[in-house]
Image (spheres, coloured by chain):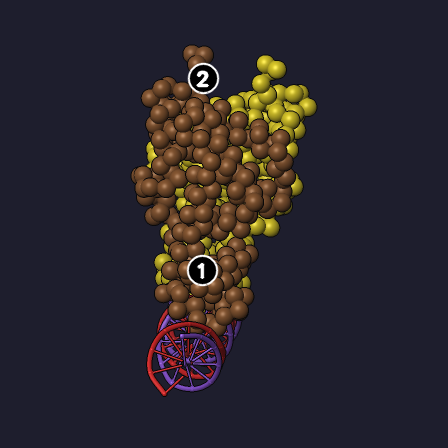
Chain colours: A brown, B yellow, C red, D purple
Amino acid sequence: MKTSDKRTDVLQAALELITERGFHGAPMAEIAKKAGVAAGTIYRYFESKDMLITELHRELEDRIVAALRDGYPSGRPLRERFLYLIGALLRYLIAHPLHFRYMEQYFNSPYGISLHRDRLLGKPGSHDILMDIFKQGMEERVIKEFPKAVLFSLAFGPMISLLRDHILGFIVLDDTLIEQITEACWDSIKRNNTA
Amino acid sequence: MKTSDKRTDVLQAALELITERGFHGAPMAEIAKKAGVAAGTIYRYFESKDMLITELHRELEDRIVAALRDGYPSGRPLRERFLYLIGALLRYLIAHPLHFRYMEQYFNSPYGISLHRDRLLGKPGSHDILMDIFKQGMEERVIKEFPKAVLFSLAFGPMISLLRDHILGFIVLDDTLIEQITEACWDSIKRNNTA
DNA sequence: CAAGAAGGAATGAACGTTCATTCCTTAAGG
DNA sequence: CCTTAAGGAATGAACGTTCATTCCTTCTTG
């Protein structure tokens, strides 16, 4: 391994504790204990708690983006690519509920707001792919003529909400439902050519 | 006035500081200062910071529910009642962005998790109204046959997401857009009688 | 044995909460 | 009326706790 095991252990411990108890219910001492490491040791790998939190977010995001890129049907039609994205994201987050919970907390904290702003104004990432889809879709008049942020909310809003309920155990997203949801996400942004 | 002005001042100060900086960026001392009150005084009205936070949530919720009930067209058709609810909620939260930000923070904190569960299982409040709509809608086969939590996510997921972007200043929800959104919310749960 | 890694007790700042004291309003007494 | 006492609200300095971070010691490795 390139990076020490301890670094990974710390990140994993932080992920578990923070998703369970929030940023403020996860003191460094406990993260250290859970990681099987001394408190001071964390600071060999992370400059501060803030850095640890930010870095953890960055790593999770990288993994998610990787999962979305993996198998992405670049050459295929718009609709297919979009459905692939939504489906892949849903499947990944259902398989990694802690990642989802962490991301949600992160974006609902002071850390995440500025990042969100950057994202919507277009920084590289999975959003690249998505924004390309939106752009092309609007040019070809297949997708509704809305600001990209609106399209984003329309497509991902319900998905995120359902995911949260699933992960908190209020509902169960089975394969049928997932299929229906991905289709519904597409429907909510595709242009109705009946006008 | 029934309750002292100071109590109100403290709640208002807490609302402003917490929405701006988060629960942990809002020390009691600063809340007190902003409220024009001494630190100790807060404890004449609230047992603890936790109680203050919880109580503030309760009061905001009461006001929102009241706004939704006000003018609710009880006797009217399903679709109309639903559109009224969505529209009223949107308008209220656009007019009261701090309330929205506070609620979001609250629900994404350790405080809010258990509450969410209660809500989905149908405690009194605006959810009463909503659940009745869902129930009747499914009986009359006007609304899709989904668990209520799923219907909730479908209808409110995009709305909440758009609201957030609007309040954070990433997009502007004008009247046209609001109209389109409320209609889209209905579309996403109404049954397509084409099958 | 040298050099870096790990340990964990010590440090100090930040914070929620408490409480002895002050201030203000209202009532009582002359 | 005016003075003064009583009661409770408000104050804010002080306390104790929690926690991120530091620092010095001990261990490991080559």
Q: Amino acid at mark 1?
A: Met
Q: Position of residue A141 (x, y in %)?
A: 37, 19
Q: Quadrant of residue B136?
A: top right
Q: Quadrant of residue B33?
A: bottom left
Seen at 32% across and 41% down, the residue is A123
For residue B150, the mark is none
Q: Is residue B187 above or below residue A123?
A: above
Q: Chain of mark 1?
A: A
Q: Earlier in the sequence, mark 2 or mark 1?
A: 1
- Label 2 sits on residue: A192
Have a look at marks 2 and 1 and say if they share a chain: yes
| Label 2 with label 1: CB-CB less than 8 Å | no
Name the image quarter holding the C terminus of chain A: top left
On the rendered structure, is B119 left or right of B105? right
Q: Amino acid at mark 2?
A: Asn
Q: Quadrant of residue A20?
A: bottom right
Q: Secondary structure at mark 1?
A: loop
Q: Position of residue A7 (x, y in %)?
A: 45, 63
- Label 1 sits on residue: A1
Seen at 57% across and 30% down, the residue is A179
Q: Secondary structure at mark 2?
A: loop
Q: Nearer the viewer, residue D8 or B131?
A: B131
Query: Do we see residue B2 in this rendering?
Result: no
Seen at 65% across and 20% down, the residue is B141
Q: Chain of mark 2?
A: A
Q: Position of residue A41 (x, y in %)?
A: 43, 71
Name the image quarter holding the N terminus of chain A: bottom left
Q: Bin the neighbour count of mark 2 within 10 Å (Cα to Cα): few under 14, some 14-19, many 20 and up.
A: few
- Between the C-alphas of marks 2 and 1, the distance is 52 Å
